[in-house]
Amino acid sequence: MTKSYLKSSVLSVCLLVLTAGFHQVTQAAEQRITATGNGSVNAVPDLMRVTFWVEERGNKLSSQKTVVDNTTERLLNDLLKKDVAEKDIQSYQLQIYPQYEQDSDGKTKQSGFIVRREIKVTLRNPENYDNVIDLALSRGVTRVGQIQFEISNQQALYQQALIQAYKQAQMKSEQLAETAGLALTGTLSITERSISRPFMMQMAETSVRSDKVSLPGQQTIEASVEVVFSVKNVQNKSN
């Protein structure tokens, strides 16, 4: 019985020691500071994306297709001569739709076909916009779609904004910790509070050339993070 009691006592002591150690670790882990930080980077959009449509209406499908194909080919060749890279031009497959009209009795009947092709162009020098629009319309483009301004290195700039946001959160935490007699010992977690989205500014669709396009000014790319820092007590030097 003595041996059994002795084993039980040793086990109880071990459990107490382990429990006390676990409590200390938990207590240390609870010493933390959470702070948010924001960062921003300014940039001017340097890309313009524009969509053209070449369309032909009629009741002779083969001849309509020929017109659209020829118009598209001339436009693509001229764009390449204007130093628009081949990778920046997307010419989509031919689309064919039935065209309807109402007769005198109010009945709807097919009157022919609409043959259409969509062409998307990326301009890496937005100042060439007017020349490209003039060229497209002179080659038979029937409609100009929405114009989108974008920042080509948006993701890299967003990463810069994230770094700024982290540094701000760190600075705020250091100030709070010093006030409370604590010191930062490490970073426990970082939560991104903003989503990286490519900047895009649109201009209205038009079927005719408007006045000179208004180029966008400087835009701001923003980021926000929440950071949890571990801290420790700072001993009083006077002691």
Image (cartoon, grey):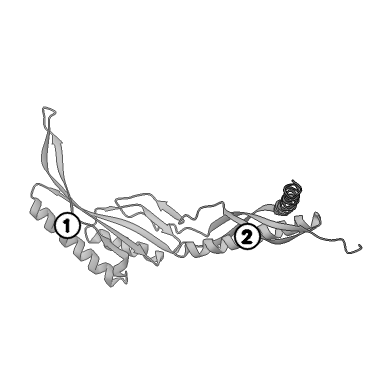
**Which quarter shows the C terminus?**
bottom right
Which label belongs to residue 98? none
Closer mark to the observer between disc 2 and disc 1:
2
Residue placed furthest toward the top? 105
Choose between 209 and 23: the one closer to the eye.
Answer: 23
Q: Residue at x 40, y 64 (%)?
A: 126
Label 2 Cα crowd, 10 Å radius (few <14 / some 14-19 / many 20+): many
Amino acid type at mark 2: Tyr
State the image coordinates of residue 125 (x, y, percent, origin top left).
40, 67
Residue placed furthest toward the right? 238
In contact (CB < 8 Å): disc 2 and disc 1: no
Label 1 Cα crowd, 10 Å radius (few <14 / some 14-19 / many 20+): many
Q: Residue at x 70, y 60 (%)?
A: 171
Q: Quadrant of residue 81?
A: bottom left
In the image, 4: left or right of 89? right
Q: Residue at x 32, y 52 (%)?
A: 145
Q: In the figure, 81 relative to 193: above or below?
A: below
Amino acid type at mark 1: Val
Which label belongs to residue 166? 2
Marks 2/1: CA–CA distance: 54 Å
State the image coordinates of residue 50 (x, y, percent, origin top left).
34, 57
In the image, 102: left or right of 37? left
Choose between 233 and 104: the one closer to the eye.
Answer: 233
State the image coordinates of residue 181 (x, y, percent, origin top left).
81, 57
